[in-house]
Amino acid sequence: MLQEHFFLAKSKGDEALERKDYLLAKFWYIEAMLDQPSDCFLALLYSKKSLCWVHLGEGFLALKDAQSCGELMPNWPEAHYRVGKAWMSLEEFDEAEKAFREALNLDKDDKELQRAHW
């Protein structure tokens, strides 16, 4: 039952994110977190929430969620990428570059990371 609720909430969040309804997407990702998913799924939710916060103009909240994502999965390039995007939204470009560089060190072939790292 809990697992079913988690995937339903995550799916609704993904649908809202695709429609660029960032506030609703964030709501559903928080709802999915209530089911206490594994670290891997929790990191994914923090990553998606961070993306929502960036689009909502909440850089500090985006950074907090991105850092939580990175604490759960420190070797996941996307976690560092999200930290970089959050720093960019806060206009902390040196910090953003460090995060993008770390992401690129973890996945040198990722084209989006290559574009982000100036």
Image (cartoon, rainbow, N blue to C red):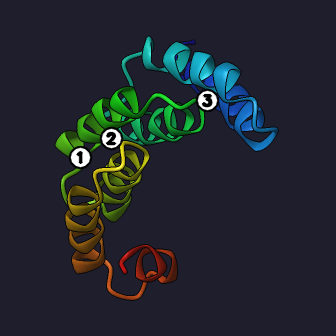
Q: Is residue 97 above or below residue 42?
A: below
User: On the image, numbered disc 3 is attached to which residue?
Assistant: 10
Q: Position of residue 89 (x, y in %)?
A: 43, 45
Q: Is residue 85 above or below residue 101?
A: above
Disc 3 crowd rating (10 Å Cα; few below 14, some 14-19, many 20+) is many
Disc 1 crowd rating (10 Å Cα; few below 14, some 14-19, many 20+) is many
Question: The disc labelled 2 sits on which kind of residue?
Answer: Ala
Question: The disc labelled 3 sits on which kind of residue?
Answer: Lys
For the residues labelled 3 and 1, say whether their Cβ atoms are less than 8 Å apart: no
Residue for point 41% across, 53% down: 85
Answer whether residue 58 is visible to the viewer in this image: yes
Residue for point 32% across, 64% down: 77
Answer whether residue 8 is visible to the viewer in this image: no
For the residues labelled 1 and 2, say whether their Cβ atoms are less than 8 Å apart: yes
Q: Nearer the viewer, residue 16 or 116?
A: 116
- Disc 3, SS: helix
Residue for point 22% across, 79% down: 105
Q: Is residue 1 above or below residue 113?
A: above
The residues bearing labels 1 and 2 have C-alpha atoms spaced at a distance of 6 Å
- Disc 1, SS: helix
Q: Which mark is residue 66?
A: 2
- Disc 2, SS: helix
Question: The disc labelled 1 sits on which kind of residue?
Answer: Gly
Residue for point 44% across, 81% down: 110
User: On the image, numbered disc 1 is attached to which residue?
Assistant: 70
Q: Nearer the viewer, mark 3 or mark 1?
A: 1
The residues bearing labels 3 and 1 have C-alpha atoms spaced at a distance of 19 Å
Q: Position of residue 55 (x, y in %)?
A: 59, 38
- Placement of the C terminus among the 4 image quadrants: bottom left
Q: Earlier in the sequence, mark 2 or mark 3?
A: 3
Disc 2 crowd rating (10 Å Cα; few below 14, some 14-19, many 20+) is many
